[in-house]
Image (tube, grey):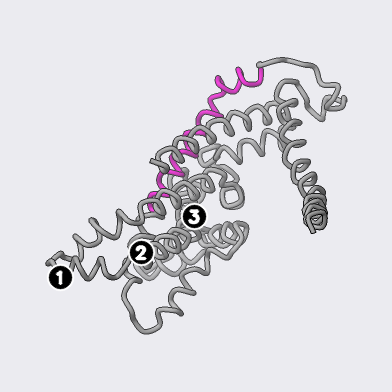
Amino acid sequence: MSDGGKGSRSIKLLSVIPINLLLYSVLIIPFALMIYLSFVSYNPAAGYNWWQAPFIGLNNFYNALKDQRFLEAMGRTALFVTLAVGLEFFLGLVLSILMLGEFKGKKIFTSILLYPLMLPWVVVGSTFYLIYQNYGPINQIFLKAVTGSAPNTAWLANSTSAFLAIITADLWQWTPFMFLILYSGLSTVPKRLIEAAEVLGASSRQIFWRIRLPLIKPLVYIAIILRGLEAFKIFDTVYIMTGGGPGTTTETISVYIYKLAIVYHDISYAAAVSLIVLLIVGMVSWYAIKVLMK
């Protein structure tokens, strides 16, 4: 019986080895290659293979710290994450509070509200690209109804309006994510606590700020961390709507790395920049998790 149990455990261990090897190879090999490439000077157009690339040490990292375009892309991405995630949290919280009550058509409304979350970034980016065109509904329907004539406004050709357009697209797609997490948390607050507070004369505002919100604080941190990490990687929406333009005024760090590797063929510099970004994101994530665990 004992031998049979050991044999069964051995079979189970052997059965997971192939998938573990596959996962480790998919994760470790590309990461190791990226580290190697960041210390050499490799450009596919140079005419030699990547394993023949000359070693240049920390030059790529040193150049990145002096690269104004890289620093601007990082700052722009941080600004985007701050604005987008902050607004998504606020809107998601408001919607989750409104949805706590019972009303007719609540299930249908919830389904419609979650619909944008199911769409790929490519679809969202393409949709909002068309919306903000001169022939799009903003000019031809909304502003025409307000002013009486359709303005000739190129929203994506202006750096400020283009950046705000990207944030709007992100809000439309990801506010449902915040709503889903926050609503799930608020819905699980024990009713007996709410009823006890009401008996003691607490107002709805006091119940929310002193009971509901403190109880879902871990969920709030988790929602902000997960959404922040995802927002930091934004690529598809930006690339489709503006391509990082006009100029480089909406270029996020993911778009910049893409251009370095694919457009400019500077593979090694792109690898070094990616490692710097990975280090920064890792440190921020570590700090956020540390705060969450307190």
Q: Mark 2 is on which residue type? A: Leu
Q: Is residue 95 visible?
A: no
Asked whether, in this view, residue 288 is left or right of residue 67, the answer is: left
Q: Which residue is mark 3?
A: 170
Q: Residue at x 56, y 62 (%)?
A: 127
**Which of these two is toward me, 239 or 90?**
90
What secondary structure prevails in the magenta region? helix
Up the image or down, 57 lies above or below 12; here it is above
Asked whether, in this view, residue 192 is left or right of residue 253, the answer is: left
Asked whether, in this view, residue 200 is left or right of residue 209, the answer is: left
What is the span of residues highlighted in magenta in the rendered image? Answer: 59-87
Q: Mark 1 is on which residue type? A: Val
Label 2 element class:
helix
Q: Position of residue 262 (x, y in %)?
A: 72, 38
- The C terminus sits in image quarter: top left
- Dot 3 and dot 2 residues touching (CB under 8 Å): no
Label 3 element class:
helix
Residue at the extreme front = 1
Q: Which residue is mark 2?
A: 186
**Which of these two is toward me, 215 or 227?**
215
Q: Position of residue 100 (x, y in %)?
A: 33, 71
